Image: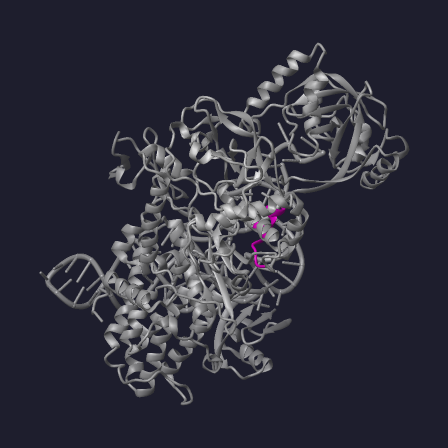
Amino acid sequence: MQKEYDPESVESKWQGIWQQRQLFRVEADAEKKKYYLLEMFPYPSGNIHMGHVRNYTIGDVVARYKRMQGYNVLHPMGWDAFGMPAENAAIAHKVHPATWTYQNIDTMRSQLKRLGFCYDWDRELATCNPEYYRWEQWLFVKMFERGMVYRKKAFVNWCENCQTVLANEQVEAGLCWRCGQEVGQKELDQWFFRITDYADDLLEHCDRLPGWPDKVVTMQKNWIGKSLGAEIRFPLENGNSEIPVFTTRQDTVFGATFMCMAPEHPMVMKLAAGTEQEEKVRAFVERIRFQDKAKRTSDDYEKEGIFVGAYCINPFTERRMPIFTANFALMEYGTGAVMAVPAHDQRDFEFACKYDLDIIVVIQPKGETLDPQTMAEAHVEEGVLVRSGPFDGLENVKALEAIADYLEHKNIGKRAVNFRLRDWGISRQRYWGAPIPVIYCDKCGVVPVPEKDLPVILPEDAKMLEGGKSPLPALDSFAKTSCPKCGNPEARRETDTMDTFVESSWYFERYCSPHYSQGMFDRKDVGYWMPVDQYIGGIEHAILHLLYARYFTRVLKDFGLVDHKEPFLRLLTQGMVCKETIKCPEHGFLYPEEAVAGEAGRTCKHCGGKVEVGRIEKMSKSRRNVVDPNTLIEKYGADTLRLFCLFAAPPERGLDWSDQGVEGAYRFLNRVWRLVADHKDRLRDVKPFEGGKPLAGDARELHRKTHQTIKRVTNDIETRFHFNTAISAVMELVNSIYALKENVLSDPAGASVFRSALEAAVALLSPVAPHLADELWEALGHTGGVLEVSWPSCREDAIAEEQILIVVQVNGKVRSRFHIRADVGDDAIKEAALSDERIAARLAGRPVKKVIVVKKKLVNIVV
RNA sequence: GCCGAGGUGGCGGAAUCGGCAGACGCGACGGACUUAAAAUCCGUUGGACUUCGGUCCUUGCGGGUUCAAAUCCCGCCCUCGGCACCA
């Protein structure tokens, strides 16, 4: 062991040993209790960033802690390797997406190894590998056979200029990110998973995820968005047809004065046909359709609509209702048509005011009379029904039921449930993804690729095209094929690929048997390891990824492939890594080195103007406030970086980067190092303290502190994952060792206690700073790493204090404190408090009204 | 607008069940060591007043409950995150 702490040499030494000993390899073993710890796998974007470091450090601490607790811990890592950035890089740098991806994986794998994470690398997987996605294709075919997938027309963002489909993140303020042209909507045939079949089940089980943060559960519930209401059919005036409408407010139906339909609604143009409105309606529909969704739903939307030239009849009032098409009506929700009740819905109210439509009050609030002439806004609250025929006088909450009954009785509608959640569109008109295993034949129609022909391999010889258009449709060697059913040589393959969320919806199951070649995974292994005991990742995946993963697991269960329904028992969503930003009014965000320190504060290197410093924001390249993990590892080592990430804040909160904080972490590790380096020789023949013999003085103190620390650290990790307080407890122990070392070391029992304290500090620190811990452990005379020993256990008898501190308050204010033997009763404590010198002086004979004694803690005297 | 989380020293944060507010770290200040600096070690460090014994104030703001409130209740302000024309 060197005198000076040199992280570089210590870390490379132990990483070599760990690898050579295959320390992180695990196998399913029915004899052992398992623990599956999973962190969300990264997209191989090029380099590990601070967010990854934080996420994976949190996971690594838990994995190592659980191993020391005796669990068989599965802790795998892999790559979410399909996705658009690879295509963008391909176009920008003329590298093939596969080359780019695999290079990035190599870089990032070595970065993760450099951080000392205890992954079982034998289980590494990359979703772009055909051995992975072939099973996804296999499942797709199974789902197709069962009708769990279907094809329908749907809109995509389309850039006419680039002749390509754009993902939502490629649409910036309604414009194409590449060419700046306005983005439109194009209707294409696409594949959908029927996730809505599981909407109720997914919603119901939200309340059975006690290990999930409430926030995430709420977000999932809102996303699923179940509404109870009714479907009401409004006949057309000409009697040809009817418009079904979904509403949650059937109690207001007597106040419905007009109808609003989504511009995409198939009936709109039919209704307008032949009327004098036809051309105007066509122009309106075209205009709204072409707007991208972000714009249509942006803040400054204006409600607008147009009369389609036809009327329907309110079946309750026989009123003739003009039919409008309006930009705020959404085809995707409900039936795409809304019965408008301007008196009791704010949107309808604004629309009615704008187009001068009738407003009829049908819900009257208590103690108030609403007048349509003077109303400033809709009345959406409760009240009593008026102008509602047989339902007059009914409270509106009761009317909801009564009118629903009436609808069903008269057969003009029915109770209905509507979900905000829509089926999962998985088609991507992209190259770098898993091919959808389907063939189109003129004779047989849609034919799934037979199991024996799987996988449908994404051809790696495709040439990437400018503008981002997928090369697959034009690649005959891929797209041209023969029909597996009839042999027709003119059949064509589906050239769309799957949403990358599909890959990430089952990778955690694949990890259980990543090399299994007979199916998606080995049932036996999945049965042993799943479900995931602890899942850790960013809050940005709180909705989609987690919902899709929950859905997929249900599908697998329905196929009898797994026994569990929920994949993740406990979930931790870690906060963002943030850092202060520096902004120049002229040059925008600056790197720290671009801001020059001067007399009047910092100035911009480029223009000399004053810069604005301080706003703390999420680290990102575009804000120029990133710090590079590599640089920090070089300077301080992985252990310091890990320590800082955990110490700066509890995991679920945001972490504010601080260079000085990193220095502090480094200083602490040096402090621990020196403690061992300076005393290992004196401790060579000293055994750890075994208990039994009575201790006195500082040795007793240190022994107590040691076990108090073990208890605190264990509790902080076990129940709360609060590593920051766990670390501060170890810091306190180290401070105590420093303060007491000479007094304690002078006698043999004391030296034993000293060794125990030191060993406890090293062991407790080992999940956080594993390299340093192993080195110190070895220096203390042990063979083998700390990971292979048991987590320290706390001796309750060592913790018990013989003297306790009692705080004395007078009227709730602290006035004195004293020590007393821990075994005395409340009455003795009360007596001691009242006779305490300072208290007696303060009371000065005033009558005591009341004395409250809190066991072994506090006395409050009320006068 | 709706939903959720949060607001504590100069800063990050602690106080786990209503019982000493400010653990631990950073920064700052002082001292030791040194020719000097760095590193290290040891102190001090919420604010105001102080006769140096203490006293008063202090957990976003205003009320309340309680012997006792950072913690519970009511009202308000601010910050962050999510959803957002959902009928």
Residue A605 relative to residue A324: left or right: left
Image point (54%, 73%), residue name:
A857
Percent coordinates x, y for residue A471 in the rendering: 42, 32
Percent coordinates x, y for residue A242 in the rendering: 78, 26
Instruction: Using the rendered image of the protein, determine whether residue A595 is visible from the camera's viewpoint.
Output: no
* Colour pattern: one colour
Percent coordinates x, y for residue A861 in the rendering: 59, 71
Percent coordinates x, y for residue A220 in the rendering: 60, 47
Q: Residue furthest right?
A: A390
Picture quarter containing residue A373? top right
Residue A105 relative to residue A372: left or right: left
Q: Which quadrant is home to the C terminus of chain A?
A: bottom right
Q: Which quadrant is home to the N terminus of chain A?
A: bottom left
- Most foreground residue, A552 or A173: A552
Dominant SS of magenta comes to helix
Picture quarter containing residue B51? bottom left
Residue B2 relative to residue A821: left or right: right
Residue A328 relative to residue A805: left or right: right
Instruction: Using the rendered image of the protein, determine whether residue A706 is visible from the camera's viewpoint.
Output: yes
Q: Which residues are magenta?
A: A211-221
Q: Is residue A751 above or below residue A354?
A: below
- Magenta span includes A215: yes
